[in-house]
Image: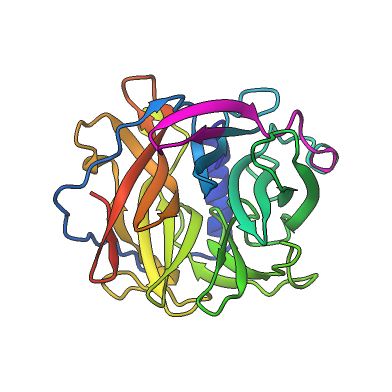
Amino acid sequence: MPEGFTRRAVWGALATGAAAGLGGCSLASSRLQPASGLAPLALSGNLTPVHDPAILKTDGVYHLFSTSHMGEAPGLVHWRTSTNLTDWTLHGAVFAEMPDWTRSDYPESRGLWAPDIVTIEGEHRLYYSVSSFGENKSAIGMAVCNDLSSPTSWVDRGPVFRSTDANDYNAIDPAVFTDADGRHWMSFGSFWSGLKVFELDPLTGLALEAEPELHAIAQRPSPGAIEAPFIIVRNGWHYLFASFGLCCRGEESTYRTVVGRSRQATGPYLDQDGVDMMQGGGTVILQAADDPDGRFVGPGHCAVLRDTDQDYLVHHAYDLQADGIPTLRIRPIQWRNDWPVVT
């Protein structure tokens, strides 16, 4: 969800989610046993404002894409690089301005946000969100390039998927993954009826069908907030990471990161206690109370970096020592009994 999403807009979305019929679910919020010896990486360089990070490593360079402040005119997806995963350099916005179709179709939108980045057959695909705030009149777009060293080489391919006020879902917060059978999928969703997946055409990066079949994978009882899915495959399991709670409130943000797993890309995703994430399940793996210094709150909207023999949870959190500015955070993941542990 964008940095400038107002309190009124968030609660409006919650109310709409209630109207979508989310009541009657049970909520689980189990915790994994804490791991010893895990700590966030010591980061330096340009780390703010980073919201909704997406990350990719290619040719020995880490590329980070994120939401910028939505108060800018307009807010655009920002691009940073690092050669060691710890020291980060800002290179500016991916787009000089919002793509034409986003301005014409969504004139009330103040920018692009919540990107995802993947490489398929040598083509880098950057997905992004655009929306009318507080509504689910939204879309997921895609831009492509073949050379990440040239920030001006992006070519916009237009919308991939849309939602309207006639739908009970919100087409933002995209994340693309390849399942255990080699099929390509996009997960998405924020508030309303929760998180969904649909199949992509690997050749184009667009939906496999003109009207793709949506598979519901997670939701929470209204007014419980859920958004920002991210799915990886490990040892035959599909792991769904998601954010519970509210973002974008600085020091008052209540984001926390949860996980469930499934043998199938389309679910069911169960948490460590066996509770289906369609019934409010989700094992909490990271929340404000886990910060060793009590400095960062609202950790969420994560991506998972699969870096050689080490996985990392890449996310934002709000810095209490800097007026709650959204800040890049990276944590190593340990796997215990096929469950991720990061604190």
Tell me the residue at 16%/47% (across/down). Answer: 37
Q: Which residues fall within the magenta stretch?
A: 80-102
As for residue 58 lying within the magenta part, the answer is no
Q: Residue furthest left?
A: 36
Tell me the residue at 67%/56% (across/down). Answer: 122
Q: Is residue 225 left or right of residue 44?
A: right
As rendered, which of 231 and 74 lies closer to the eye? 231
As rendered, which of 65 and 108 lies closer to the eye? 65
Relative to 109, residue 172 above or below: below
Tell me the residue at 35%/31% (across/down). Answer: 43
Q: Is residue 116 left or right of residue 329?
A: right
Residue 156 lies, in percent from the top left, at 79, 45
As rendered, which of 173 and 328 lies closer to the eye? 328
Residue 199 lies, in percent from the top left, at 65, 71
As for residue 87 lying within the magenta part, the answer is yes
Classify the position of the N terminus by image quarter: top right
Which picture quadrant has residue 86? top left
User: Residue 24, can we see it?
Assistant: no
User: Residue 234, can we see it?
Assistant: yes
Residue 123 lies, in percent from the top left, at 69, 54
Residue 286 lies, in percent from the top left, at 30, 49
Q: Residue furthest top?
A: 322
Relative to 187, residue 103 above or below: above
